[in-house]
Every structure is written in C-alpha cells, then in structure tokens.
Image (cartoon, rainbow, N blue to C red):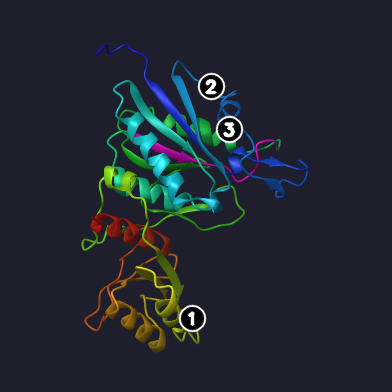
Amino acid sequence: MNANKTKKIVVLATGGTIAGLAINAARPHEYASAQVCVEDLLKNIHQNGIELLNEQVAQIDSKDMTFAIWQSLLGRVAFWLAQDDVQGVVITHGTDTLEETSFFLQTVLQPIKPLALTCAMLPANVLDSDGPSNLNDALSWVQQLDVTGVSVVCANQVHAGQAVQKSHSQQRNPFTSQIGITYPQALRVPSVAQVLACQHWPRVDVVQNHTGADGRLVRSLMAHDAPQGWVVSGTGNGTLHHDLEAALLDAQKQGAHVLRASRCAQGGVQSREADVLPHAGALTAVQARVALLLHLIAQQR
C-alpha cells in the first residue's frame, strides 16, 4: 500500500443534541434533537488534508436508541474499520445513552483502530454550541497513530468507551470515567456476526434496591411476562432488601439470569463469602444490562 495515500475518516451520524435545533436560540435547553443531517454538521469542519466520508445511520434522540440501530451501527463500523485506507471512525451520538452504545461497541468489536463517539450538550444553532469543537476534537483524536479502541471525546476530555458514565445532566462535560472496570469473566461475548444475525433480542430488565423494596415487580413479571434476565441496582456493595433478594432468587430458579450492580456512582461491587447472587463488579447497572444481553445472544442457537 502506498504510504503517502490519503487516509480516510468516516463519520457515522445517529442524531442527538449535536444535530439538534433550538426553537429559540435564547433558550437553548428547549430544542428538538436530531434535526441536522451529517453533511451539514461537517460543513464547517477543518479537514486538514483528511478525506472525510459520512453516513446518516440514524436520526434520533438517543433516549430512543434501539437494538436495530445498534445492529446497523455495528455493521457500518465493522465495515469501515476493515477498509485498509480508513484510519478511524467517528460517531455522533446523543449523550443520554452514549455510555451504553460505547460499552456495546467496545465489547463486541474491541477494535484495533480508533473509534470515537462524540456529542454535544447544546443544540447546533446556539451561538456557543459545543458540537463543532467536540466533533473537531474527535476527528483529531482518531488521527493519532497510537490510539486504538472505543473512546468518548467531549469537552476537551477523552474517556475509555467501556468506562464512561454520564454523571451530570446539564454541564458541558457531563461524563466521568469509572475506575477498575473489568469485564465479568462468567459472561460470554458474541461475535459481530452473531449480533448482526440476532433477530430476537433477549429481554433484560433493571430493578433498583431501595427502602421498602419488596420484590413485587419481579414476582409479577416472572409470573406473567418474564424477562430472560434481571440486573438489580443494589445499595452500597450491591446489597439488597431481603424481600427483593428472595424474589430474584426465585427468578433465578425459574431460569432467569440475575446480576447485581451498585447504584453508587463509583466503586462497584466486591465479592463476599455470603453472596447468593452473582455480581457485575465495577460495571454500572446499564453496562451490566448490556453485558448480560450480549451473554444471552452468545448462548442463542
């Protein structure tokens, strides 16, 4: 291959606030997400000799992310990263479910080329919108020769894709990075082909421990509309009200997979001899849900 050949960067757009428009620029918190197409997002981007390709994979508010869009995104990312003349891929995404998408892509792909997700907290037509600078930073990040894997680039910070968490609902930098993230060894990871071929995604529901958590919701669903898996966001070190724990143990006996996480922002769950339900370590509840979904897909035949 010609070493001087221009490298390509591919931008895959999914919508979000970065593509949003405010009804009134003076009230930037009142806006509609996913209004600006990817070609328009890239109009004022400095290319610096890099050839930019783009695709509009979806156009949604990321709170409405679906498994079908994940599959489409996974397929396009896998395709482009496999091209010799593509140096990296950037995904524009809403902040609300970005941590789930980045965890999903890193887990399934584990790419050896750079893949950056970026976003915005202010819509595109606001004077001081953060979208253009975040997009420029993400494009610069994936051009670095020593970068691999999934990253989240936002507000002059870079977070590992498997460790990022949205921890603030308003500020320009809404993300923090978790410490000590390791993937649970007991959980299998499906291949890209398995995920793309999955026609019926498993159902994994999330329930939270709290004062008076009596397990009624778990028992009701197991009796009438049982999911294949449960993630419980426990207090402290993944601890559970005894009634909720009893309901989840019954669910486990009925064949449901159960994972404990912690509702604390940092620290996760550590093993104890008295544990009766497995835990997801340092994964958050939403990350544990993605991990369990993928494990169940890997088991499908």
Q: Is residue 118 above or below residue 63?
A: above
Q: Does the magenta stretch include residue 119?
A: yes
Q: Residue at x 38, y 84 (%)?
A: 247
* Residue indicated by mark 2: 46
- Which of the two residues, 73 or 254, is positioned nearer the viewer here? 254
Helix, strand or loop at disc 2?
loop
**Residue behind mark 1:** 210
Q: Position of residue 286 (x, y in %)?
A: 42, 61
Q: Label 2 to label 1, Cα distance in Å?
A: 49 Å
Name the residue at 39% across, 82% down. Answer: 240
- The amino acid type of the residue labelled 2 equals His
Mark linked to residue 132: 3
Using the image, tell me which numbered label, if any, was put on residue 240.
Answer: none
Q: Residues within 10 Å of mark 2 (few under 14, many from 20)?
A: few
Q: How crowded is mark 3: few (under 14 residues within 10 Å), some or many (20 or more)?
A: many
Residues at circles 3 and 1 in contact by the CB criterion of under 8 Å:
no
> Label 3 sits on what residue type?
Pro
- CA separation in Å, label 2 and label 3: 10 Å
Residue 78, picture quadrant: top left
Callout 1 amino acid: His
The magenta segment: 114-125
Image location (x, y in percent) of residue 104: 37, 50
Q: In which quarter of the image is residue 261?
A: bottom left
Secondary structure, mark 3, is helix
